[in-house]
């Protein structure tokens, strides 16, 4: 019986992973080692009971008493806090879903690799902040990393049986997010609610806004470079509003392999869960006659400055990815809190990177986990300073 752990079980990816496991027999067919979640204690407890997990961990220590009460009599151990999540990642499992959002997901995935596990990586920040480190750790312990982002799963599948040296370009598709058809001059006034109205995908709050700003695609561009080892000039982004083609790989003979399917994350989750086999998945089947047509357009860098920033991060190398992601997370926090505007997020990130240029250093081959965590911490301080300055300036103008 294969053993599994899910980090970020109560998020969108975690929920859909649990759905697939329950449909496949749940605890009758899999041994669930660990489930971790955020503030939704009731849902985490229900999942742990349904899957008969060995341990359930909530990120916030204040939720521990509630979690213990809900799991009383179930035989499921309860724990809480960052150290408990790390301890859970140290428990051997054959297959681990890394779906904690943000930089917080890096260390649990890193630890899981030490057991030679298959790491299903939905946490794109891990490769953005510490790609060389994570890949080296996987190689050291003979572990495997399988991509779960829909775009990178599509690329991975399009490369099956192919030589990476024959790849001419990789084309990441992007929906364009909730604000893709807004006039450019109106974006500065976009509210959180408006940025959350994604036309295609059902995702968590943070990634949905990252989709609207295209920061998620910026992270995915960097992730593509790290995971597949291609040159940044080989990576393209195209707006595909229908979200039916999840990404494409172009080869030197002019052929393009495209992965198509309904916009449902269970495609990529299920592929990673069942790899190297393909098993039945409860996802919609495309009716191409009903689809009729698909559209594509080049992204406007004035509308999506995050894409330009991704190129500058790849040129900087070293620990710039860690700084970029940390500043992006802080910018998003301040937008959600109403402190800065939608279009001010990219400016805050760019200013933070410029401020840190003299402090980053460290080539990729010298990177350590401690380096990444130190730069993440420093970038958050600098980004918060910039956000506070913006808020003060705006308050003075009012």
Image (cartoon, rainbow, N blue to C red):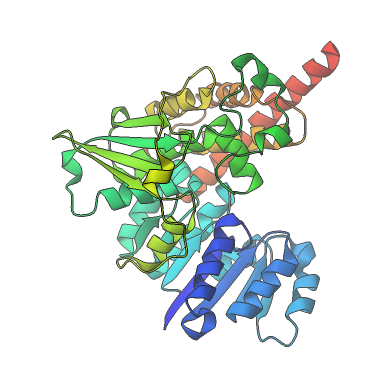
Q: Nearer the viewer, residue 186 or 71?
A: 186
Residue 254 position in % (x across, y down): 17, 33
- Seen in the picture, residue 85 relative to 398 is either above or below; the reply is below
Residue 53 position in % (x across, y down): 59, 78
Q: Quadrant of the C terminus?
A: top right
- Seen in the picture, residue 286 relative to 344 is either above or below; the reply is below
Left or right relative to 41: residue 216: left
Q: Residue at x 44, y 33 (%)?
A: 240
Q: Nearer the viewer, residue 275 or 57?
A: 275
Determine the residue located farthest toward the front in the rendered image: 289
Q: Residue at x 34, y 64 (%)?
A: 143
Q: Residue at x 48, y 73 (%)?
A: 4
Determine the residue located farthest toward the left in the rendered image: 253
The number of callouts visible is 0
Q: Work out whether residue 129 can be spotted.
A: yes
**Residue 194: quarter of image:** top right
Left or right relative to 157: residue 68: right
- Seen in the picture, residue 183 relative to 241 is either above or below; the reply is above
Q: Work out whether residue 89 can be spotted.
A: no
Residue 161 position in % (x across, y down): 18, 54
Q: Nearer the viewer, residue 397 or 51?
A: 51
Residue 208 position in % (x across, y down): 60, 41
């Amino acid at each position: 019986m294969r053993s599994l752990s899910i980090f970020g079980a109560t998020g969108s990816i975690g929920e859909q992973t649990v759905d697939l496991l329950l449909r496949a027999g749940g605890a009758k067919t899999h041994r669930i080692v660990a489930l971790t979640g955020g503030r939704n204690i009731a849902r985490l407890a229900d999942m742990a009971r349904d899957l008969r997990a060995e341990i359930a961990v909530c990120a916030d220590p204040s939720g521990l008493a509630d979690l213990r009460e809900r799991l009383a009599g179930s035989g499921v151990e309860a724990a809480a806090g960052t150290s408990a999540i790390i301890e859970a990642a140290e428990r051997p499992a054959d297959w681990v879903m890394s779906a904690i959002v943000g930089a917080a997901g890096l260390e649990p995935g890193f630890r899981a690799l030490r057991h030679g596990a298959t790491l299903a990586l939905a946490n794109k920040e891990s490769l953005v902040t510490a790609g060389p480190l994570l890949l080296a750790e996987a190689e050291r312990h003979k572990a495997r990393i399988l991509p779960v982002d829909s775009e990178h799963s599509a690329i991975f599948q399009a490369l099956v049986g192919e030589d990476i040296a024959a790849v001419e370009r990789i084309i990441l598709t992007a929906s364009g997010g909730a604000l893709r058809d807004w006039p450019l001059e109106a974006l500065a006034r976009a509210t959180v609610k408006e940025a959350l109205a994604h036309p295609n995908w059902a995702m968590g709050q943070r990634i949905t806004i990252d989709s609207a700003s295209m920061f998620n695609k910026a992270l995915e561009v960097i992730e593509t470079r790290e995971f597949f080892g291609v040159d940044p000039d080989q990576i393209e982004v195209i707006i595909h509003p229908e979200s039916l083609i999840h990404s494409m790989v172009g080869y030197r003979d002019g052929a393009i392999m495209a992965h198509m399917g309904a916009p449902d994350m269970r495609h990529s989750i299920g592929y990673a869960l069942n790899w190297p086999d393909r098993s039945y998945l409860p996802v919609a089947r495309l009716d191409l006659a009903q689809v009729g047509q698909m559209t594509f357009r080049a992204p406007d860098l004035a509308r999506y400055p995050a894409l330009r920033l991704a190129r500058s991060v790849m040129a900087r190398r070293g620990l710039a990815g860690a700084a970029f992601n940390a500043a992006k997370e802080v910018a998003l926090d301040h937008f959600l809190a109403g402190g800065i505007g939608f279009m001010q997020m990219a400016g805050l990130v760019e200013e933070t990177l410029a401020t840190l240029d003299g402090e980053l250093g460290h080539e990729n081959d010298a990177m350590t986990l401690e380096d990444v965590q130190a730069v993440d911490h420093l970038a958050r301080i600098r980004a918060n300073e910039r956000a506070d300055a913006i808020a003060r300036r705006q308050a003075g103008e009012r």
